[in-house]
Amino acid sequence: MLPPWFLYTAVTVVLVLAGTALFFFTLTRGALILRGAMGAAGDDAAHVYPIYSNMRLIKLIDFQPIIAAILLFQYDRLVSAITHGLRDMDLQGKKVLITSCAFGNVIPRVVKAAAESGASRVLIADIILNELTHAKSKLPAFAGKVEYLEENATAMRLPDGSVNANVIFFLLHELPHPLKGVALSEACRVLAPGGKLYLAEFHRPDPWVLRALSWTYFKVFEPLGLALWDTHDPVKQLEAMEGFTCERRTVFFGNFQVIVATRAPAA
Ligand SMILES: C[S@@+](CC[C@H](N)C(=O)[O-])C[C@H]1O[C@@H](n2cnc3c(N)ncnc32)[C@H](O)[C@@H]1O
């Protein structure tokens, strides 16, 4: 016979997990299903979850331990892979772009790494103004160095070859399939010769147990993400573009990937 405290604890844990799952479902995929049903799916930002557009929700959820847990405590490792790459580049007097904001400390860490490598300017682009306002609140130390651009990653207004590094952190899996490739070609178009695109994303895990859990997560919460495993593998899409070479590093049993795509230097 199980002791009552064990049963109370088990029931509480199950209720908290179920409540958290329901909360996130409602504010992510659930909201998109509702939007579609109400015929509001035509907008450029129709695929963006309310947790990225409503300022109260942004502030409620943007708490480092929650964000780290969502990425299975690999967040720090993934960000470090990008910041180490930026620190190894000579960005003296050059521009760095962050295409789309993200929760946690990725933006301050990327901006700091870019500034330490000599970048003269960091541009942060996002389709949602509230996200840019929120990002700005994390960067008081870099006022004057950072520019905030309300931009669609799939139709950037920046000129060709205008930045030397471009960082995209977990955006692709949230974009409708046809827009994944468009966002990648825009990310490459704005890169100067010799420039680098840093892309952190989900990847198909190696062990079948993790793959099954991950597949279930995507089916329930983020069905647009599964295509990154095969039909919309970013490396295949980037290698199909002329003048780019790619390196892929996977972490945590293959569950995540950091891709570095380098544009060939000018001849
Ligand atoms: C990078 S993604 C997800 C980040 C990740 N889940 C996290 O926070 O750790 C979320 C951001 O992408 C932005 N976004 C979504 N679609 C976009 C688009 N087409 N162009 C620019 N930004 C976009 C959203 O507004 C939001 O700020």
Image: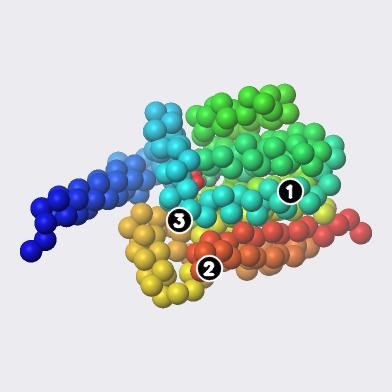
| Side (left or right) of 224 relative to 129 | left
Residue pictured at 7% horizontal, 64% vertical = 1
Q: Earlier in the sequence, mark 1 or mark 3?
A: 3
Rendered view: 262 above or below 63: below
- Give the quarter of the image for residue 23: top left
Q: Nearer the viewer, mark 2 or mark 3?
A: 3
Q: Which mark is residue 86?
A: 1
Q: Amino acid at mark 1?
A: Leu
Q: Residue 218's spot in the image, x, y percent? A: 39, 60
**Which residue carries the number 2 mark?**
254
* Label 3: element kind: loop
Rendered view: 167 above or below 50: below
Q: Earlier in the sequence, mark 1 or mark 2?
A: 1
Q: Tell me how far mark 2 sits from mark 3, CA to CA.
A: 12 Å
Mark 3: few/some/many CA within 10 Å (<14, 14-19, 20+): few
Q: Amino acid at mark 2?
A: Gly
Residue pictured at 83% horizontal, 53% vertical = 193
Viewer-side residue, 225 vs 79: 79
| Side (left or right) of 8 relative to 40 | left
Q: Which mark is residue 72?
A: 3
Residue pictured at 62% horizontal, 43% vertical = 99
